[in-house]
Amino acid sequence: MSHLSKQSWQQAIPVGSLLRFFGCLFLALAIAGCQVHFVSNYDEATDTLARNLQSKIDRQFQSWIRMPAGSPGLKYDDKANREFYAEVSAELSVLEGRAKAQPLNQTTVAMIETIRNSMDRIEALHREAQTISAAALSSVQAQIDFQFQRLIAFELAKKRGETPKS
Amino acid sequence: MAAIVVSDLIDVPKLIDDAVGAARNTAGVQFAKVQDVVTTNAKQLAILAADIAEKRLKNQISPAEADLLLELQKNSIRISLLNVEGVTALAVEATINAVLNVFIGALNTAVNAGLKVL
């Protein structure tokens, strides 16, 4: 069969047959009382984990923003800062694992992977420069907040029967 | 929503209009289903872009920090597109299920007399 050209396929499977097939499939689904699902169900644990992680990151960024420039607390090598990045990485892994365990959840998994990429980039710059300016931090926080908001908004949109507004 | 400040470098309202227009042209008849999500995302992304441009112009951030913010902006756009993709899938799912419910209702009415097939 694999040697058949596109035209041969079109001749072998006429459009009318396809329409009848999908018509029958639709009727069969209706008779079976099925509802189709293209996206995973809402998961409260994912929602809660994401909110808590966003809150934790926000608190840390706000703490850094309030420190005077050159403060030792801003240095990447500060023990508390290294622990912060390690904890965020671990919590992102938990969130990702939870999302991957849900069927039809590729979009949410891709969103979490993108947030991880963002956090990795922030850590890399912090490690290399040993500090981040308050002006950059406020923009970084806005970007990370935006990314978490999209993740949480999509999770909430999965509560069927509601029209997502954002 | 608060008034959007127009950056010296980026005309935020124009950027929003362009982004929403591009989405409208690409999504075609499906656009109505995702219009709210697209518009909200475009507004927020435009404000974030203007923020980066202004801080770099005023030398408030280093070149390395500007590079980081641009990479984060790319990720924000990526997440925004994933959000639209997901919401579109939900809208299509809801449409199909609404049609299925019409079939189910018709079948239940047809068999009537307490004999529920579904």
Image (tube, coloured by chain):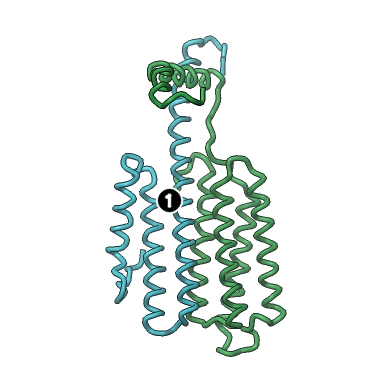
Report the number of numbered marks: 1
**Observer-nearest of B110 and A27:** A27
Question: Element type at marker 1?
Answer: loop
Q: Where is residue A40 in the image (x, y as percent from the top left)?
A: 58, 41
Label 1: chain letter: A
Q: Where is residue B15 in the image (x, y as percent from the top left)?
A: 31, 63
Q: Seen in the image, is A162 located left or right of residue A32?
A: left
- Residue A10, above or below B12: above
Q: Give the colour of chain A.
A: green
Chain letter, colour cyan: B
Q: Seen in the image, is B23 located left or right of residue A32?
A: left
Residue at horizontal 51 percent and vertical 82 percent from the top = A134
Residue type (three-letter) at the residue carrying disc 1: Lys
**Observer-nearest of A1 and B51:** A1
**Observer-nearest of B51 and A152:** B51
Q: Position of residue B38 (x, y in %)?
A: 38, 52
Q: Which residue lies furthest to the front in this view?
A: A3
- Name the residue carrying label 1: A165
Query: Label 1 crowding class (10 Å Cα cut-off): few <14, some 14-19, many 20+?
Result: some
Q: Quadrant of residue A120?
A: bottom right
- Residue A66, above or below B68: below
Q: Quadrant of the N terminus of chain B?
A: bottom left
Q: Quadrant of the C terminus of chain B?
A: top right
